[in-house]
């Protein structure tokens, strides 16, 4: 019986787990959920179904016995590792319980200044939502016709009241990505007039990663900040760990309003993150599997005549307006967690890329509906 079956069996089995039957899966692909045809498909949250990496799982197990300590030392070790990977110093790094907590902190920082945020109108809105609660205005800039963020138009919206420019690249929910070559000159130019916050939650999925690293801009352009997460390609969404890279003077200001006091991430999560950064084979495996499953899904979208937008990361954004309001009920009927998005009188789906098996189940369950 594997761990997932044990978990399904309830409390008695959980005690068995605690008593020592917890063995990390140590080879690539072993962790991928083994779904039965009737299981609920969770394609709503852009998670990596293959994670955490074998090395991360082993690190979690090993770090449990040290978890009676507050995690400052292991946090410092992770900061040093992240800094090294990005050519920066540990003083450039702020850790958070998921990048959501970094977005919240940044929202608080801008909100308390009562400054405006310039951002795309159709993007990941958590930072703006938080800052708006505190009195900031969200200056919305439309996407271009191909659903790409329009950096030129954003530049034009910066005013003396702009406290932050928020760019999500690759953009969630559209999946469109502006290459570093194209985006970096804009980041540099905009940062001369306002701080630029680049949310790179999905950057590891892009073709120009890690060569064209936005973090490299920070030394000469201290108004540029980069936010990343271990929730996506690293497959550790449940372990809650993200980070910000920024000039040390900004990090210092944020630390003053961060209730976490630098110890808000669990010891085990920090150990897992350090191990993940060293597990290149897992990263390559995840990239390959994601692309294989995404191609499979896109092939079906084409067969069903469903238009979709350029996709770079672990989700595909498609226009399902022709199915109108019926789609929500159908997804529920087919036991699929996926929320349609209503926007400008159109209906979209942002379908997360699961394992290949999950995409096969999605295609077989939705085929009748999409071909009727
Ligand atoms: C663009 C983007 N930023 C940030 C987050 C927050 O992720 P987490 O808090 O798990 O790091 C998400 C989650 O989906 C996201 O899509």
Image (cartoon, rainbow, N blue to C red):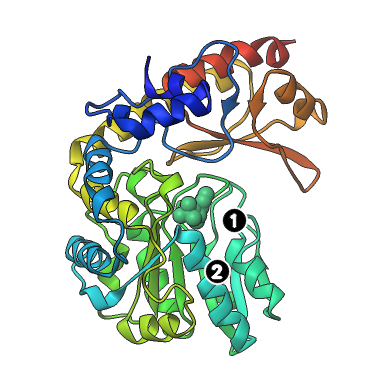
- Residue 23 can be seen in this image: yes
85 versus 196 height, above or below: above
Sequence-wise, which precedes: disc 1 or disc 2? 2
Front residue of 55/214: it is 55
Q: Look at the numbered disc 2 and say if its residue's Cβ is closer than 8 Å to ligand 1.
A: no
Kindly report the distance in space between the C-alpha atoms of the residues bearing marks 1 and 2. Answer: 16 Å
81 versus 1 height, above or below: below
When asked about the image quadrant of residue 119, the answer is: bottom right
Front residue of 254/343: it is 254
- Badge 1: how crowded within 10 Å, few (<14), some, or many (20+)? many
| Circle number at residue 350 | none
Q: In the shown orientation, is residue 137 left or right of residue 99? A: right
- Badge 2: how crowded within 10 Å, few (<14), some, or many (20+)? some
Q: Which residue is mark 2?
A: 104
Residue at horizontal 57 percent and vertical 78 percent from the top = 108
Q: Position of residue 20 (x, y in %)?
A: 29, 31
Secondary structure at badge 1 equals loop
Q: Position of residue 231 (x, y in %)?
A: 42, 48
Residue at horizontal 49 percent and vertical 16 percent from the top = 35
Q: Position of residue 86 (x, y in %)?
A: 22, 64
| Circle number at residue 123 | 1
When asked about the image quadrant of residue 3, the answer is: top left
Q: Position of residue 324 (x, y in %)?
A: 81, 30
Secondary structure at badge 2 equals helix
């Amino acid at each position: 019986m594997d761990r997932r079956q044990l978990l399904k069996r309830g409390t008695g089995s959980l005690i068995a787990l605690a008593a020592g039957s917890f063995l990390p899966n140590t080879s690539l692909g072993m962790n991928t959920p083994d779904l039965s045809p009737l299981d609920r498909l969770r394609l709503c949250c852009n998670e990596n179904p293959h994670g955490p990496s074998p090395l991360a799982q082993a690190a979690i197990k090993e770090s449990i016995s040290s978890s009676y300590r507050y995690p400052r030392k292991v946090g410092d070790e992770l900061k040093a590792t992240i800094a090294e990977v990005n050519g920066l110093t540990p003083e450039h790094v702020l850790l958070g319980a998921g990048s959501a907590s970094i977005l919240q902190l940044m929202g608080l920082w801008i909100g308390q200044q009562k400054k405006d945020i310039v951002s795309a109108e159709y993007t990941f809105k958590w930072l703006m939502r938080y800052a708006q609660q505190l009195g900031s205005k969200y200056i919305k800039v439309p996407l271009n016709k191909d659903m790409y963020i329009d950096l030129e138009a954003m530049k034009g919206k910066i005013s003396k009241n702009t406290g932050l420019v928020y760019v999500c690249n690759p953009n969630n929910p559209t999946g469109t990505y502006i290459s570093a070559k194209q985006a970096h000159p804009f980041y540099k130019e905009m940062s001369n007039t306002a701080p630029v916050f680049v949310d790179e939650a999905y950057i590891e999925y892009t073709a120009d990663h890690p060569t064209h690293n936005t973090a490299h801009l920070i030394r000469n352009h201290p108004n540029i900040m980069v936010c990343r997460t271990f929730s996506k390609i690293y497959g550790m969404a449940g372990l809650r760990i993200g980070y910000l890279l920024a000039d040390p003077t900004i990090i210092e200001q944020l630390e003053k309003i961060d209730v976490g006091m630098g110890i808000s991430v669990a010891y085990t999560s920090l150990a897992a993150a350090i191990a993940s950064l060293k597990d290149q084979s897992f990263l390559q495996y995840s990239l390959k599997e994601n692309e294989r499953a995404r191609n499979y899904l896109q092939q079906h979208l084409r067969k069903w005549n469903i238009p979709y937008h350029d996709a770079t990361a672990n989700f595909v954004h498609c226009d399902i307006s022709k199915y109108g309001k019926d789609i929500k009920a159908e997804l529920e009927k087919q036991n699929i967690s996926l929320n349609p998005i209503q926007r400008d009188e159109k209906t979209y789906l942002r379908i997360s890329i699961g394992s290949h098996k999950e995409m096969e189940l999605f295609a077989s369950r939705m085929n009748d509906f999409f071909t009727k």
